[in-house]
Image: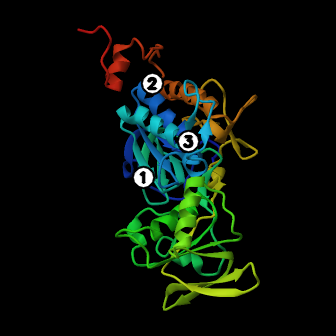
Amino acid sequence: MEGQAGQADGAGTLNAPFEAPATAGHPVDAVVIGAGPVGLFQVFELGLLDLRAHVIDALEQPGGQCIELYPDKPIYDIPGLPRCSGRELVARLMQQARPFEPVFHLGQQVAALQRQDDGRFLVQTSRGTRLLARAVVIAAGVGAFQPRTLKFEGLERFEGTQLLHRVTDPAQLADRHVLVVGGEDAALEAALVGAQEGPHRAASVTLVHRRDTFNADPQTLERIQALRAQGRIDFIAGQLSGVVETGGRLSAVHVACSDGTNRTVALDRLFVCLGLSPKLGPIAGWGLAMERKQLVVGTETFETSEPGVFAVGDINTYPGKKKLIVCGFHEATLAAFGVSARLFPDQQQPLQYTTTSPRLHRLLGVDTPGAA
């Protein structure tokens, strides 16, 4: 993570550890930090008020917990959807937000936030993206999800090259010796990609898990067992006990097997799929009022202690708070009106309905019923 977030000074501004003029970032209406369901709905609600958003998320794809933790498990408490999967919910929210053309900055965290002299916020990410936002909405859930990894000295040097946490490009596996660590869906999917026939088939696939039982979709398990029976996936019950570096490259790992033996397995790619761990990250250092690692907000606009910075979803707290997606949707609606009121204090905010408003229909790109 690049940089560290600054603290609020006596004037209630946010100071970042870098100095930059207001022209150093791309001007935007709002930055939404977090691309989970509530962050995606925040984009939609801002769009209805004719405010465009850029979205920043530490994960490589939108969806937050829904995609990373339970993409195919059913959700039963979304209004109007008696049952849907996390994947389906995210797809619907992306479709709903599409008319407002949100810009996504994925695989990066907000490293610093600084109020400029003109009142806007200079937002800098861990990948060097700089945005000048008139308002910021933090929809970071319980924090930025980061892959759990292995604690071996020097292993971090291979992060993103030989050490990976998901298959983003199947070509990464082609003709390589691949070792996958983990026992859930992400690990098994990585093993499947490498073991199946096709142009991206790996030279070998070894799956390591502490025991020969897995927490994954039954259909995925069936495919894994079939490939094991065909000898296309080698399974080892055990845990990694060390890594081998040769000529500046990760060349092998040591495995302490559950039967008491030890093996050394050569590899070209190491996929560590041990799940995700939420970390609050730099947000904790921005000087915003917090209680138990959550941002304190008012329930009229969901603004934080810093004017112009709002918080919705699991990241915030207030009396009676309930950590439910449906509650986050409500918060995002009021936060959008709060952002609009903050940016346009002299304008009235008439409440319009998507069923009847020609203005909203224009923004959504749909026809007004009964219009000539």
Circle 1 packing at 10 Å, graded few (<14), some (14-19), many (20+), is some
- Image quadrant holding the N terminus, namely bottom right
- Image quadrant holding the C terminus, namely top left
Whole-number angstrom distance, CA of label 3 to CA of label 2: 36 Å
Whole-number angstrom distance, CA of label 1 to CA of label 2: 24 Å
Residue 83 occupies quadrant: top right
Q: Which mark is residue 86?
A: 3
In-front residue for pair 233/160? 233
Measured along the vertical axis of the image, is residue 63 above or below residue 282? above
The reply, left or right, for residue 134 in relation to residue 263 is left
Give the foreground label among 3 and 2: 3
Looking at the image, which residue is at 52% across and 86% down?
Answer: 251
Which residue is farthest bottom?
Answer: 247
Amino acid at pointer 1? Arg
Residue at the spot of label 1: 130
Amino acid at pointer 3? Gly
Circle 2 packing at 10 Å, graded few (<14), some (14-19), many (20+), is few
Amino acid at pointer 2? Phe
> Residue 182, how many percent across, how many down?
63, 66
The reply, left or right, for residue 371 in relation to residue 106 is left
Measured along the vertical axis of the image, is residue 269 above or below residue 81? below
Residue at the spot of label 2: 344
Circle 3 packing at 10 Å, graded few (<14), some (14-19), many (20+), is many
